[in-house]
Image (cartoon, coloured by chain):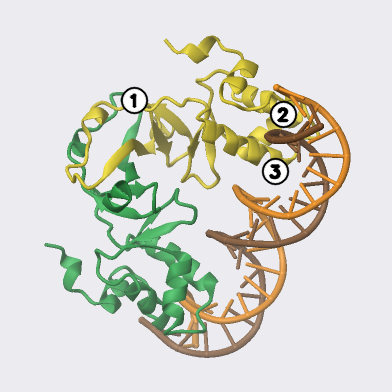
Chain colours: A green, B yellow, C orange, D brown
DNA sequence: CTCCGTGCAAAGATTTTGCAGGAAC
DNA sequence: GTTCCTGCAAAATCTTTGCACGGAG
């Protein structure tokens, strides 16, 4: 289904015209599977530091920006610090739990039908954020 | 239609359980009509400074947070610095122009039909952001 | 060999917090 | 008279930028 699913990090980087370095491979692996969570720059830095203690914060930021520019990651704002999502698939949206602060991927029904009647706007993408309580926080 | 429309700032503050001070009245007026734009803390500080040169940035931030907590303003994240929207009406959403960076209020069709089929999530509100080009940037 | 990526440090920007005086109620 | 708000300053985050070295291509 997804052509990237079987590609390893190094090839993926080359495919996107980025040089392959240990830091970039490590940062990319920090996301684990494409379904992995949404990570902040800080979490990534912490996670990769175990493997590469020298890794500078600035490099994490620079690299993440490169990845976003290349389309390898998706950036999500509005949650304090920026989060990065390995799941680039448009059509998936987010649920933000007001209880625990967690962020979940969701696929709402009817999302495709949402549109602007005003022809003055050229819509490129549509992002939907639901806020409320996740199952754990709702019962608690 | 809207009971607030005819209420003056002072009453409005009292209604929300907030003390009425010159600073708060000024900050609230900075938004002008309820349809006024989306302002950043910095823009508000600049705007009110003309009237109250003493006004501290910290006060602007504190006050805006109070207002949001009281439901008087709506906070919009994801555009660099936080923006504050006098239009609290849910059901109105936003269009973000990738050309000029402008933020516009929109009322998309079909928005009411968007929902999560997953019953585990208790949705409280739904926020939709469209990104693309506004009429000016599209023709340029 | 050339250029890009990295580390380091420093700067920038945004937002929050501690504290004492003063105003609102 | 209390309590909350304000101003000031300082701190805490988060993120970007300048520069010289070193590794990728």
- The residue carrying mark 1 is B107
Residue B58, numbered circle: 3
Residue B42 appearing in the image: no
Instruction: Kindly identify which chain the residue marked by label 1 belongs to.
Output: B
Instruction: Kindly identify which chain the residue marked by label 3 belongs to.
Output: B
Residues at marks 1 and 2, CA–CA distance in whole angstroms = 33 Å
Query: For numbered disc 3, what is the local secondary structure?
Result: helix
Q: Is residue B131 left or right of residue A35?
A: right
Image point 33% across, 34% down: which residue?
Answer: A122
Image point 30% across, 74% down: which residue?
Answer: A14
Image point 63% across, 27% down: which residue?
Answer: B18
Mark positioned earlier in the residue sequence (1 or 3): 3
Q: Are marks 2 and 3 on the same chain?
A: yes
The residue nearer to you, when weighing B27 against B39, is: B27
- The residue carrying mark 2 is B23
Mark positioned earlier in the residue sequence (1 or 2): 2
Instruction: Kindly identify which chain the residue marked by label 2 belongs to.
Output: B
């Amino acid at each position: 289904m997804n052509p990237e699913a079987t590609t390893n990090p190094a090839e993926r980087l080359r495919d996107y015209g980025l040089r392959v370095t240990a830091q970039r491979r490590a940062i990319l692996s920090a996301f684990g599977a494409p379904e992995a969570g949404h990570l902040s720059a800080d979490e990534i830095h912490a996670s990769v530091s175990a493997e590469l203690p020298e890794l500078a914060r600035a490099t994490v930021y620079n690299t993440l920006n490169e990845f976003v520019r290349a389309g390898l990651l998706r950036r999500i704002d509005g949650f304090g610090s920026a989060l990065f999502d390995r799941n680039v698939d448009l059509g998936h949206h987010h649920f933000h739990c007001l209880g625990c602060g967690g962020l979940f991927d969701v696929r709402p029904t009817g999302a495709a039908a949402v549109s602007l009647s005003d022809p003055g706007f050229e819509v490129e993408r549509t992002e939907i954020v639901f806020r409320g309580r996740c199952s754990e926080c709702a019962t608690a």
